[in-house]
Amino acid sequence: MIQEKLKQLLPEVEVDPRAISALLCGSAAAVLVLKWVGRRQIQEKMEEARRTRDLGLERMEQVAWKFKQKNPGVQTSFILSLPLVELAEKLKEGSLSPEIVLYTYIDKALAVTQEVNCVTDFIQGCEQQLQDLTKQKEKGLLYGVPISIKDHIGCKGHISTGGLVQFLGKVEEEDSVIVKVLKRQGAIPFVKTNVPQSMINYDCSNVIFGQTVNPLNHKKSPGGSSGGEGALIAGGGSLLGFGTDVAGSIRLPSSFCGLCGLKPTGNRLSHAGLVSPIVGMKSVMATIGPMARDVDSLVLCMRALLCEDLFQLDPTVPPIPFNEEVYSSSKPLRIGFYDGDGYFQPSPSMKRAVQETKRLLQGAGHTLIPFSPPRIDYVVDELFTKGLFSDGAANLLDKLKGDIVDPNLKSQVNTYRLPVVVKRIGALLLKPVYPRIARDLNALCGVGSAKNLWKQHAAVEAYHKEFIAKWRKLQLDVILCPALGPAFNAGYPGKLFAATSYTNLYNVLNFPAGVVPVTTVTHIDEEELKDYRGHYGDLWDKRLKEAVEGAVGLPVAVQCVALPWQEELCLRFMKEVETLAHGRRQSLTYRDP
């Protein structure tokens, strides 16, 4: 009995019966010894994971050097400059070989990770896949394209850590469905990328592999939880990557790193074979999706994935192929828009990005209609936070047992660990002074019972109907709204989890949503930030102001949203925004003396 209890308390420890005897004799030293041994075993596991990572990086260096020695005349800069669609065409027609492209990107990814620490694993099987690929007669849409994948996306023979020690040593026995489909389309997964500890955070740091920084500014976070993907792609080390999103984890790193990212409807792509610290949570929809440098890359990716292979490998995915007619339509759109959600005041550059994009869209013949998400406070607190942590964060805390909590996650974890009664009392005391923080603390208590969980699910469904009714009343096609940004200073995402309100709304609703960079932070934005007060004037508002300071020149994105299962319309809207924003930037550059 004692042994079982100790095992629950310290899951990483091999409990010695002699230690139990000492404990039964009342020796407090035995407990200290057990804790020391547990910590030592944790350190050994982490060191082993780092050695595996380092050996992988050494292998990347070796194969890249070997290739360059054999092919001294390869124009790597030309290959790296090609957009995905153009590269894919050259690979398919044979003017570029998959070998040249793969080793070029291995070399570049190595250089990027040496700068920003984003690669956690080299998928050595990519070399064998390359050999097999060149023998195939049929060429898929992604033939020969090197791709990167987020740490917790399953890849045969590799570990999906989720940034957690508990998952170390658990080698995947087969590829996730999404990796299988990518390979069948000719893509070559070659690296896995870093995530924040537990992935319930939008920074990118864990105690196993350390902190990933933003390649555009090393003082800034790349975002998360798909932050390693954001950093690698923004640094030029990958053309196409895959992340996951339960609160903005594709859209936030895309926003922070100046990329395009798509969060599809929850089950448009397969989740099978992904590791999660909160398996069983159904109130907020998590999803997997692509990240890339432009919208065309996302479109090519979705065309490739929405195929018969996907529908056969995972029958739970609706067999809906890519709708070319919807994507290629030029019909003017009715676009709802808002430049602030009422929960967090947008930074000056966030607001300006939406306003400028709105004017561009109006000038292109689209109709823009003011829109405001109904009851945003209720959504963030009662539907998102209470839904994500409906168990009072118990499952997440279980995954952290025996682990060393990363400094960037400590603020969150310390709050989650508070007893329910302390959270309730704290919320009561804070309510008159900091009502928003009080509501959040209350929501973190969870739902309390299965009966209340059913009520919570019913409340989410009711909100879906309310939101769609408002959408239909205004006869909207899509919505334009802010994406959180610019990139936060390092360490701030873990102190501002609730600032994901701009993105987590569409996880609660399970709507497809994507981000597109449209502008950069100006000196005027930075000056206006000095007057930022926020809606509540509380600690969170003060932190958000500090988080986005010092961002002149960094990208700012907008968010594009469509109704469920309308990814093609969402992408069409994103492409329109991207084209107009690019045209505006070119015009300004041309006029600049």
Image (cartoon, rainbow, N blue to C red):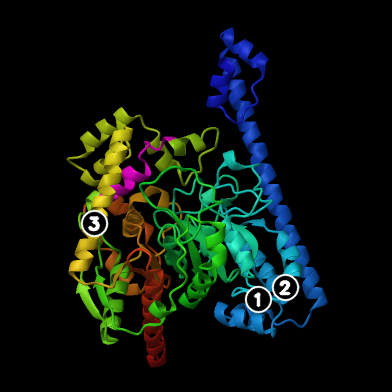
Q: What secondary structure is the magenta-colored segment mainly? A: helix
**Tag 1–tag 2 contact (CB < 8 Å):** yes
Residue toward you, 129 or 202 = 129
Quadrant housing residue 329: bottom left
Disc on res. 136: 2
Q: Residue at x 42, y 63 (%)?
A: 264
Asked whether residue 307 is in view, the answer is: yes
Q: CA distance from mark 2 to mark 3?
A: 48 Å
Viewed as shown, does residue 559 lie left or right of 467?
Answer: right
Q: Is residue 388 magenta?
A: yes
Q: Label 1, on which residue?
A: 139
Q: Residue at x 52, y 62 (%)?
A: 311
Q: Quadrant of the N terminus?
A: top right
The residue that disc 3 covers is: 465
- Mark before the other along the chain sequence, 3 or 1: 1
Q: Amino acid at mark 2?
A: Gln
> Magenta residues?
379-394
- 478 vs 502, nearest the viewer: 478
Q: Nearer the viewer, residue 402 or 162?
A: 162
